[in-house]
């Protein structure tokens, strides 16, 4: 992805007025619809329509029902939505989700990106380390949750064990049972699984920088730090943005890890919207209510991402 | 893929056209087996035994919701989507009631008389599956949820000859346990194991009748007996029974089992009988010798024989394709052969056809209690799932702050949720 | 290359990777020790008993071979389709003008937040009516559908920096969009496709909920191994074995595809002139 050098050079070069596509793209007047787009989109739209859109529309329909699955559905109008906005547990879930998604994403990307930059300076020597960090990404959330339970558990957990061993007895804490630390414990575990992704995308972006460009900078007397700061950092930004996107949305949906480490507790301290939706739809089986919370979340995210996507699309043309 | 779909459709058509007479093994019995671990193996073993006895019936074991902590979601999803099966294994009376209310189960009273299941199951067990005067399920495994488990050497080391059977004496024994360097009681309250303590305290404070009313929401959560139960639990907390609230909230019953039965770091734990197989298989301890259980101590002598139990039963779906085979299967499970297989897996069955002599002393002890006590199904499974969620969190709040003010706040919160759930 | 490789990144990353290894080491330790030892903490080495009981148990109890094949085929189908189609969609969204393009992109991308538990019930009903329960399609279709949300965006992001000169040249040569796509864009998008492939493979390989509900005889590896733990039997040692068994293949795939990234860096610098 992420072939930074070309973008910067092509942006500087004025496009030839005679080259077909560029001309049409640049001058709005000549724009016509490219119907061939639908041929290119057809397979995507097919799978999307069956696998996602149809269930989503059904969810929208169900969100106006009072339905626990086994009984006959009753029309509920906007009742589910009204109840949702008044539900203190939903408010709590939104608060927790804000801390959770932002922290997970920020920390994962910060770690992954800085490691990618370091790898860029020494790609060969750091290869095994990259594999180790990425390997965590390939392990299911359930399994990672089990591993981290072994670290954060108060009695037999590694963390408290190490603290005791080095004489920091006072620092030991039932990390997952203390409402103040439980969320951070789960965040640490989640970051462990997620940091491999930004590392992968950012490192790919850095690898795509032509060697010649770096070598030229080096010949001009640039230090490692300058190469990192002025070449690798800006040119790996596309990798960063895709990682932010995927990490953000991944953490929004995280469930298994939370289930294993804290089951949403203590006292709902780790109950994210994802967990809330799971409880309502799968455990309590309040189909209508769970559907309403899904739709609300979806709309909220759509509104937030609208400017981003519109900006992207206009930039592209 | 297409090919596979095609052939199975063809097979369906073929069986419809040629009917049951075409082949000997034409009957199919579909069992929704969502269990995991050794319980799952036990069911598969029962199915194999059944097939051997009735070669004309082919058992198909489906598990669209295998393993996991709470299989109710998977079961409901399958039901909702129209998954067809004959027998469902159930362990939540609240789910069973909902299925009965929506006409998804068929009554078993006819089969009960025809096969004479009353010789296997007492009326008290039959009544656990009674809804509006009809019987919808046959219990085949049962457990004690009132057992306080402990290591014999832990108690001996603290100078406790026998576990006090009265509440005050029980609380008083905490001192000697603490002096011998043990945490008196380990409560793992991360998820749901804290509810065991409340439920047993409730049964011994207010009795099974009140608990039944509470489960049906004929009594209120703000009623005095509920608050009295909380205050009794507070007495226990104030007798320094347990670790700090944070430690309780970060541990599960498995941690409690490790601390109490394996490492001997803590005195007692309260949990279902499944811990027995963990202790004997994984910790390699001798039941009755290395460890044992006593029933939850008496609080109000009027409710001394109240006992919390759990169990799994078999229910037959209303749209079952083969109800006769389903009934035959239930009959097999309750029979001496079926009971023997269940016993092999260390599970107690309420069936009178079980041979108690085959059990280890611990299982034999609670199997006898199952017959003689005033049994009440574990409250958390009687509550609708949503209320049970509020109930669990409320108990976590209580462990953090057992003050009168908080008891009032908690009981009001559960009552408010109950008003919303039971409409 | 005259530049000297600095050593500090190696030390820092080495130290962090060592930390990263701790939970991984834990999984291995759990799989080779009796459960009674693990429950005191896998890192407690006294006593240490080596045993392959859990491995033998898992190996003999579960029909791993069949589940492995199911998992592999499902993950392959569910990976190849987005790898082929996401670039096409991204090309259309990026270079072409067509009605509702922004709305379509918005819906497509935001579908990423759709949780699995939302799609299962409507799809379950649909699959039953179509007789697709227990067929690979029942799992592959939602996997592929859900993947486009991020896969299209990922490739589109890549196209943002695609050398426009190449496309313009093709247009001047009279290539239509389909030909431009197939002959110019697709062969030069290997990096983006590799990224899509790796991520999608890992997700579909580890997925549990959808295959658990839609498959019966054709259960995947994670579904099969999820029956290891009962509600009351954690069976940590066997679960550790299951984790290792299921994680090996994604790791190998990653190692293989990782080479694509660096190789592609070289290819692409040649395309400039």
Image: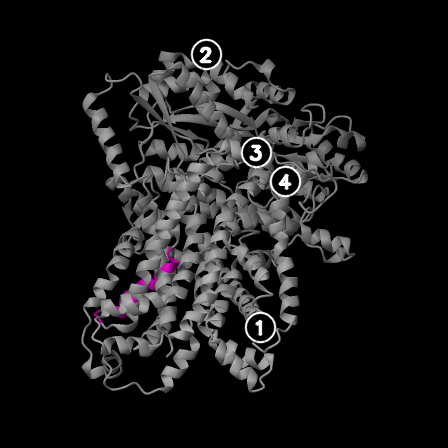
In the image, are marks 3 and 2 on the same chain? Answer: no
Number of disc labels: 4
> Magenta stretch: dominant SS?
helix
Q: Does the CB distance between marks 2 and 4 fall below 8 Å?
A: no
Which residue lies under the disc numbered 4? C32
Dot 2 corresponds to which residue?
A: B119
x then y, percent, for residue B279: 65, 30
Q: For mark 1, what is the residue? A: A121
Residue highlighted by disc 3: C56
Instruction: Label 2, secondary structure: give it.
Output: helix
Would you call the spot at circle 2 few (<14 residues within 10 Å), some (14-19), or many (20 or more)? some
Q: Closer to the camera, C84 or C156? A: C84
Residue appearing at x 23%, y 79% in the figure: C172
Q: Is residue B352 left or right of residue B101?
A: right
Q: In this rendered view, identify the residue nearer to me: A166 or C91.
A: C91
Q: Position of residue B389 (x, y in %)?
A: 49, 45
Marks 2 and 4, Cα distance to the nearest angstrom? 48 Å
């Amino acid at each position: 992805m992420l072939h930074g050098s070309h973008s910067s050079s092509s942006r500087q070069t004025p496009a030839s007025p005679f080259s077909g596509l560029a001309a049409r793209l640049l001058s709005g007047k000549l724009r016509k619809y490219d119907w061939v787009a639908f041929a290119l989109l057809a397979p995507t739209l097919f799978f999307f329509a069956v696998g996602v859109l149809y269930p989503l529309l059904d969810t929208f329909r169900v969100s106006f029902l009072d339905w626990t699955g086994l009984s006959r559905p009753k029309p509920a109008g906007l009742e589910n939505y009204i109840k949702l906005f008044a539900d203190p547990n939903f408010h709590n879930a939104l608060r927790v989700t804000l801390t959770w998604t932002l922290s997970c994403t920020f920390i994962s990307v910060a770690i992954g990106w800085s490691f990618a930059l370091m790898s860029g300076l020494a790609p060969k020597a750091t290869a095994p380390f990259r594999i180790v960090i990425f390997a965590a990404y390939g392990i299911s959330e359930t399994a990672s949750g089990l591993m981290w339970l072994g670290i954060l558990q108060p009695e037999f957990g590694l963390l408290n064990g190490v603290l005791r061993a080095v004489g920091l007895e006072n620092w030991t804490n039932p990390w997952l049972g203390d409402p103040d630390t439980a969320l951070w414990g789960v965040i640490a575990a989640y970051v462990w699984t997620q940091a491999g992704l930004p590392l992968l995308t950012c490192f790919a972006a850095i690898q795509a920088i032509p060697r010649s460009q770096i070598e030229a900078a080096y010949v001009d007397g640039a230090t490692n730090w300058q190469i990192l700061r002025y070449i690798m950092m800006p040119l790996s930004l596309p990798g960063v943005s895709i990682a932010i996107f995927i990490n953000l949305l991944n953490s929004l949906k995280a469930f298994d890890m939370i289930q294993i480490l804290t089951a949403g507790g203590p006292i709902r301290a780790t109950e994210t919207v994802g967990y809330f939706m799971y409880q309502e739809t799968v455990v309590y089986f309040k189909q209508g209510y769970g559907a309403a919370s899904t739709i609300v979340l979806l709309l909220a995210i759509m509104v937030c991402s609208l400017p981003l996507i519109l900006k992207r699309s206009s930039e592209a043309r | 893929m297409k090919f596979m779909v095609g052939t199975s459709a063809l097979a369906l058509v073929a069986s419809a056209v040629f009917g049951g007479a075409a082949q000997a093994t034409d009957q199919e019995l579909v069992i929704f087996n969502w269990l995991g671990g050794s319980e799952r193996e036990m069911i598969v073993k029962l199915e194999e035994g059944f097939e051997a006895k009735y070669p004309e019936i082919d058992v198909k074991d489906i598990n669209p919701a295998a393993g996991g902590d709470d299989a109710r979601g998977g079961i409901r999803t399958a039901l909702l989507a129209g998954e067809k099966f004959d027998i469902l294994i159930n362990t939540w009376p609240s789910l069973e009631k909902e299925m009965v209310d929506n006409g998804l189960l068929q009554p078993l009273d006819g089969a009960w008389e025809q096969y004479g299941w009353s010789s296997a199951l007492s009326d008290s067990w039959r009544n656990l599956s009674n809804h509006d005067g009809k019987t919808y399920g046959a219990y085949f495994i049962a457990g004690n949820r009132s057992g306080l488990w402990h290591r014999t050497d832990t108690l001996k080391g603290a100078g406790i000859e026998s576990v006090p059977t009265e509440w005050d004496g029980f609380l008083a024994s905490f001192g000697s346990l603490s002096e011998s360097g043990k945490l008196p009681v380990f409560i793992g309250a991360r998820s749901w194991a804290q509810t065991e303590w409340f439920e047993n305290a409730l049964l011994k404070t207010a009795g099974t009748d009140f608990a039944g009313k509470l489960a049906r929401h004929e009594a209120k959560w703000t009623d005095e007996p509920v608050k009295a139960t909380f205050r009794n639990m507070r007495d226990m907390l104030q007798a320094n029974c347990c670790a700090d609230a944070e430690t309780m909230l970060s541990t599960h019953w498995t941690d409690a089992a490790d601390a109490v039965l394996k490492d001997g770091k803590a005195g007692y734990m309260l949990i279902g009988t499944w811990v027995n197989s963990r202790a004997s298989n994984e910790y390699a301890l001798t039941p009755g010798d290395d460890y044992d259980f006593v029933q939850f101590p008496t609080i109000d002598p009027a409710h001394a024989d109240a006992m919390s139990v759990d169990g799994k039963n078999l229910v037959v779906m209303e749209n079952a394709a083969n109800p006769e085979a389903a009934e035959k299967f239930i009959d097999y499970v309750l029979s001496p052969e079926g009971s023997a297989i269940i016993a092999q897996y260390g599970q107690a069955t309420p069936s009178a056809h079980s041979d108690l002599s085959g059990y280890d002393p611990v299982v034999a002890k609670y199997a006898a209690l199952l017959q003689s006590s005033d049994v009440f199904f574990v409250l958390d499974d009687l509550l609708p799932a949503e209320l049970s969620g509020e109930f669990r969190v409320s108990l976590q709040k209580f462990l953090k702050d057992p003050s009168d003010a908080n008891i009032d706040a908690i009981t009001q919160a559960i009552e408010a949720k109950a008003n919303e759930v039971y409409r | 290359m005259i530049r000297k490789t600095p050593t500090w990144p190696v030390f820092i990353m080495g130290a962090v990777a060592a930390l990263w290894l701790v939970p991984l080491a834990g999984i291995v330790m759990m799989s080779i020790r009796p459960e009674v030892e693990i429950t005191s903490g896998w890192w407690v080495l006294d006593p240490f008993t080596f045993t392959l009981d859990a491995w033998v148990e898992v190996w003999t109890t579960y029909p791993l071979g069949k589940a492995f094949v199911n998992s592999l085929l499902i993950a392959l189908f569910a990976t190849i389709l987005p790898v082929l189609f996401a670039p096409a969609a991204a090309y259309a969204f990026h270079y072409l003008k067509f009605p509702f393009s922004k709305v379509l992109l918005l819906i497509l991308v935001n579908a990423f937040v759709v949780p699995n538990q939302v799609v299962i019930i409507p799809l379950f009903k649909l699959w039953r009516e179509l007789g697709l329960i227990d067929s690979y399609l029942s799992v592959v279709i939602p996997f592929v559908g859900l993947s486009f949300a991020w896969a299209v965006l990922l490739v589109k992001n890549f196209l943002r920096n695609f050398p426009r000169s190449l496309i313009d040249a093709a247009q001047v040569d009279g290539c239509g969009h389909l030909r431009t796509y197939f002959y110019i864009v697709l062969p030069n998008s290997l990096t983006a496709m590799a990224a899509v492939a790796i991520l999608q493979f890992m997700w579909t390989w580890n997925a549990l909920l959808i295959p658990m509900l839609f498959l019966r005889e054709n259960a995947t590896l994670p579904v099969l191994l999820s029956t290891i733990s009962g509600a009351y039997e954690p069976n940590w040692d066997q679960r550790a074995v299951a984790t290792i068994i299921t994680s090996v293949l994604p790791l190998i795939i990653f190692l293989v595809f990782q080479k694509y990234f660096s190789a592609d860096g070289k290819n692409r610098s040649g395309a400039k002139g």
